[in-house]
Amino acid sequence: MISKYLYYFIATLVLTASCNNIQQPLPELIDEQLTMASEQYKEMHAAVPADLMPRSTDPETGELITSGTGWWCSGFFPGSLWYLYEYTGDDELKQMAMERTALIEKEQYNTGTHDLGFMINDSYGQGLRIAGIQSYRPVLVNGAYSLLTRFNEVVGCIRSWDHGDWEFPVIVDNMMNLEYLMWAFRETGDSSFYDVSVSHTEKTMENHYRDDFSSYHLVDYDTISGEVITRQTVQGFADESAWARGQSWGFYGFVTMYRDTKDERYLEQAVNIADFLLSHPNMPDDGVPYWDFNAPDIPDARRDASAGAILASGLIELSRYVDAADSEKYLAFAEKIIRTLSSEKYRAQPGENGNFLLKHSVGHLPNNSEVDVPLTYADYFFIESLMRLIKLNS
């Protein structure tokens, strides 16, 4: 473990380099970012009550906002700790990760949410993968079966929300939870996990996506006929707009479904979504999207660091499955995003930002919720993107 003095010295160097626009070698930038993150997350662990999880900060006061384990983001903090332990080998981080992961155990029986992939797979799943803790396996399997209960055979999808006036709402974010079900298929051999994942993917590809490969946020289905009732973009600017984080969620989901099924149509879908995003006329030069690609106040619209971090991680994964030219293109864009997020504009200084790593994310702007604040999942996918780059070159 590095001393605090060395930690703050490294932090100063990183931020000074950002101010002076010095192009650091990428391996050096990755090492410095993950080293800083490890120390910042130790401070986060100390600051957050032992029975809660960090969520965000108050936009007015900057004070830390926490959540219980039933909140859809509860798995991201322990997941980030697991990644940082994987990088550093620091047993203190491992202990912290285990403590926070244990809090989520009861959610294995939660059938009231579609976000069990985020909650359980990103915590228990990372702990099993990284530390080989076998007692995590039954929790993961139970959680996957809980998620299956939300599948409707007539609709062919997993239900997303239980609130609102919709009959059977399915949001594009739900593509992110299929990776969890595909893990459960490989672990148990139960084909239900595979069949549900494929059915949900097919319906999403058919009904969420427009001709230009942008996505609606929500599709509401009739449970009697299985037909689409309406298509909306609830957290975006307008129903026909391209809400940025939703585009990143869907893209990432199709990449993982290709990886786990080898269905070439899912790879083609992922490539088409990536190309839509990377060539969009409203994609900023630095690679971090506006909160909605059709926001009316561009170029003054809010940026969304979380959408950028998710996109970067997905692009790195996608680069493994395409030809050399496309791989180079996607990696170059991912690196652009990572360098931007590592800059002073987005990367918080030690001791600030509630100990979160990234600034300037947007949760639900139309509802004025979590606007221009740090978000726990932005940090998670930023860390994941750095770890994926390391593994890609190892």
Image: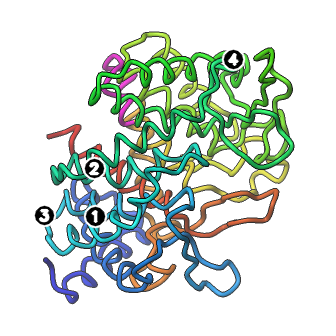
Q: Secondary structure at mark 3?
A: loop
* Residue with the mark numbered 2: 387
Please tell me which residue is depicted at 29% across the width and 28% down the height of the picture: 188
Label 3 sits on what residue type? Gly
Asked if marks 2 and 1 touch (Cβ < 8 Å), the reply is: yes
Q: Secondary structure at mark 4?
A: loop
What's the magenta region?
316-327
Residue 133, compared with residue 63, is above or below; it is above
* Residue with the mark numbered 4: 154
Numbered disc in front, either 2 or 4? 4
* Residue with the mark numbered 3: 89
Numbered disc in front, either 1 or 3? 3
Whole-Å distance between the Cαs marked 3 and 4?
47 Å
Numbered disc in front, either 4 or 1? 4
Q: Secondary structure at mark 1?
A: helix
Residue 261 point in image, percent of width and height: 38, 17
Residue 110 point in image, percent of width and height: 52, 51
Q: Nearer the viewer, residue 292 or 26?
A: 292
As drawn, is 190 to the left or to the right of 116? left
